[in-house]
Image: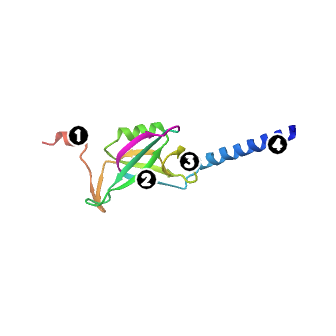
Amino acid sequence: MFKRTVLTLVVLALLAALVVGYFTAMMRWSYSTGDRAGWVQKISHKGWFCKTWEGELALVSMPGAPVEKFFFTVLDEDVAGDINRHMGKRVSLHYEQKVGLPTSCFGETRYYVVKVVPVDDISLSPGVIVQPPHPAEAASAP
């Protein structure tokens, strides 16, 4: 009876170690990485037990074109704070795509934003870029 209990505990410990190892590997490994630029429309802290930041970025390729939305997840509180500070401004989000995470406890999307950079120039169409005036230039204009 003692040997059966020990064997059961060893098997359960091995299974738990495999599950933890799998999730650790999936969170550290990225299927792809990239950048998306646009305007952050929404970011909210969601979840019943596992709270994550979920957001959407409006991508506009050309004036008059339909708006495409990029849905993303943020796990880092500092990155979520940066996104909140730049709400309504054009930003570039650097993301990592994670696959193999079976539950929504890790986020609602596969795209995990790890860095946000404000973008000053506005691309109206391929080859047409508008650069807003710098605050010093705008202040000196009549």
Label 2, label 1: how many angstroms apart (C-alpha)?
30 Å
Q: Amino acid at mark 3?
A: Thr
Label 4, label 2: how many angstroms apart (C-alpha)?
49 Å
In primary-sequence order, the first of circles 2 and 1 is: 2
Q: For residue 117, which quarter of the picture?
A: top left
Residue shown at the point (42%, 51%) measured from the top left = 71
The quadrant of the image that shows the N terminus is top right
In primary-sequence order, the first of circles 1 and 3 is: 3
Neighbours of disc 1 within 10 Å: few (<14), some (14-19), many (20+): few
Residue 79 % position (x, y):
44, 40
Residue furthest out toward the left: 142
Residue with the mark numbered 3: 103
Q: Amino acid at mark 2?
A: Asp
Residue 35's label in the rendered image is: 2
State the SS at label 3.
loop
Residue 100 % position (x, y):
58, 53
Label 4, label 1: how many angstroms apart (C-alpha)?
73 Å
Q: Nearer the viewer, mark 1 or mark 3?
A: 3
Q: Nearer the viewer, mark 2 or mark 1?
A: 2
Q: Nearer the viewer, mark 4 or mark 2?
A: 4
Q: Is residue 47 magenta-colored?
A: yes
Residue 93's label in the rendered image is: none
Label 2, label 3: how many angstroms apart (C-alpha)?
25 Å
In primary-sequence order, the first of circles 4 and 2 is: 4
